Image: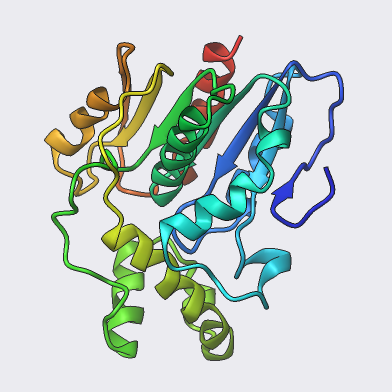
Amino acid sequence: MNNKLFIIPKPNPNATLRLFCFPYAGGSSTIFTPWIEQANTHIELVFVQLPGRGARLMEPAIDNMPEVIEELLLYKDFITSKPYAFFGHSLGSRISYALACELHTLGLPLPSKVFASASRAPHCTSNKKYLHDLPHDAFIAKLRDLNGTPKEVLDNAELMELLIPLLRADFKIADTYVAEQHALPTPIHVFHGVEDEILDEHILAWQALTAQPCTYKYFDGGHFFIHQYGEEMINIINQQLT
């Protein structure tokens, strides 16, 4: 598979399963780099790279969920060509759920599992104030508070001017997208940081989106616990995808 949307860091034609990894709002596929050597040998990692980041930095970012899903569905044959699973962190969880719903509607093979990390269930309306339309300085200050953008990036004014359109586009989707409630036949495993500000009922509400029992793993830490517990998370994913 040779396109800009999917990065396969360690191609493995003998893999029996692909794990598609969706980053958080404003995040790039580099957050998954440590997993390359930690994933089981039967798993081929596929990092999803939407416009506006990485090698696609100069492409305009998409600011609404239907267009994100439309781009992903251009490659539905590749996505469903062998057994697969989805992992998403924060906004990435909601994108992966929306994609799974569309694939279900189309009658295509579904992921064997969806790993939803650091996200409210997508059919729940956010209890937080919108970020995407804040004035410039307030927006940057909020990014500092969230602690997901490296300080050296936030302090680099030229780089931030390049990245702000992407960040605003991603946060617009994160702020405004609410899914229709659709129970997938696919099991969902939820990762959650106990210090994250997401309401408990919005975490537990993932159960409404699967006809299977929803399973949960809680970590110490806030919204970006993936940076502290990435190794433990990929170990759990390895076990569950065996």
Above/below status of 205 relative to 15: below
**In this image, 211 relative to 6: left or right?**
left
Q: Quadrant of the N terminus?
A: top right
Residue 92, percent across and down?
46, 47
Q: Nearer the viewer, residue 193 or 87?
A: 87
Q: Who's the residue at 60% across and 45% down the image? A: 73
Name the residue nearer the viewer: 29 or 103.
Answer: 103
Would you say 204 lies left or right of 179 here?
left
Residue at x-position 79% and y-position 53%: 3
Locate the C terminus and report the quarter of the image it occupies. top right
Residue depicted at 26% across the width and 29% down the height: 206
Left or right of 56? Residue 145 is left
- List x then y, in percent, for residue 195: 22, 43
Residue at the outermost front position:
106
Taking the spot 37% from the left edge, 61% from the top edge, the residue there is 173
Q: Quadrant of residue 21?
A: top right
